[in-house]
Structure formats: C-alpha cells, structure tokens
Image (cartoon, rainbow, N blue to C red):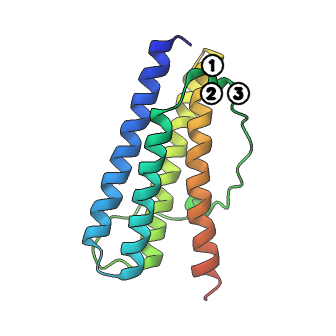
Amino acid sequence: MDQKAFEEIILFAIRKEVEAATLYGTYANLASTEGARQMFKDLQAEEQKHKKILENLKKEDVTRYRLKKVPNLKIGDYIQDEDYYPEMSYQEALLLAIKREQNSVRLYQDLSRGAEEPELKKMFLVLSQEESKHKLKLETEYDQRVLTED
C-alpha cells in the first residue's frame, strides 16, 4: 500500500471518528436522563481519543499490529436500529450505541473483503478490530447492567 492510499484511509477513519464524536456529543446534550447523558459523553471522549490515535498512526504501525479475535456477545445482532430521542433510557441509549458500533465493524469488514492488496486488507481489519472493541465494551456494559437486573 502506498503512502497516499494509507493517508486516504486514515483520513476516512478520522472522519468517521469525528462524525461519531459529534453525534454522541449531540446526544449527550439532548439526553434527558443522567445515565444516557453520561454514557454519550463517555463515548464522545472515547471517539475523540481514537481520532488522536489515528492522527499519529504510521504505516509501519499497521504492519506491526497484531490482529486478535475480539469476543462478540452478539447483542447487536438481535436488536433493531434505534432512532435517538431525548427521553431514551440508559438501556435504549446503550442499544443505540451498540448498533452504531456494529455498523462500523461491518463497514470495515466489507471494505477489507473488497481490498485486493494485503496491506490494505489488513488496514481495514485493524480498523474493524478497533470498532469491535468499542462494541464489546458496550455489549459488556449492557450484559452487566441491563440483562442481570431483570
């Protein structure tokens, strides 16, 4: 993968992180429940942190990156896309965030399948893995806070 292609992918990923951070920030400002408000603020901060990591990522970092299997609790597989509304509960906010992260995972997986160059494929798999970690964190929270309360 040449440097230009690498930079284009990084810029695309940065735009996705900025979009997510902006959206989560908007949701935090609109949320009427404290649990949802705090969760969206935390997600916004996490996406901003990932943006900074991407801004400092070098091509050789991707080459050295070791892909690992991220557990999938599959909670996102059994929920419908949710539309945001200010009164949504913490549970509903978690489900919304899980689905968004799942869609990001799928995007990068699809892009990796379409890539012919091995380095390009790996770059998309790295991004997919990072989004999978976000999703796992949210699904774990859902499993521990929502499913165990019932």
Residue 135 shows up from this direction: yes
Q: Closer to the observer: label 3 or label 1?
A: 3
Name the residue: 28% across, 71% down.
85
Name the residue: 74% across, 45% down.
69
Q: Residue furthest top?
A: 2
Is 22 placed left or right of 78 in the picture?
A: left
Name the residue: 50% across, 40% down.
53
Disc 1 target residue: 119
Please state, as top left, top right, bottom left or bottom right, where the C terminus lies in the image.
bottom right
The residue nearer to you, when weighing 83 against 134, is 134
Specify the label residue 149 is tagged with: none
Task: Please provide percent x and percent y for residue 27.
Answer: 31, 65
Instruction: Give the amino acid at mark 1.
Output: Glu
Disc with the residue nearer the chain's start (3 vs 1): 3
Q: Closer to the observer: label 1 or label 2?
A: 2
Relative vertical location of residue 80 with respect to residue 38 in this rendering, above or below: above
* Gap in angstroms between the C-alphas marked 1 and 2: 8 Å
Q: Residues within 10 Å of mark 3 (few under 14, many from 20)?
A: few
Q: Secondary structure at mark 3?
A: helix
Disc 2 target residue: 62
Disc 3 target residue: 64
Task: Please provide percent x and percent y for residue 147.
Answer: 62, 80
Count of numbered marks = 3
* Gap in angstroms between the C-alphas marked 3 and 1: 11 Å
Q: Residues within 10 Å of mark 1 (few under 14, many from 20)?
A: some
Mark 1 vs 2: CB contact within 8 A: yes
Please state, as top left, top right, bottom left or bottom right, where the N terminus lies in the image.
top right
Residue 84 shows up from this direction: no
Q: Residues within 10 Å of mark 2 (few under 14, many from 20)?
A: some
Name the residue: 49% across, 13% down.
3
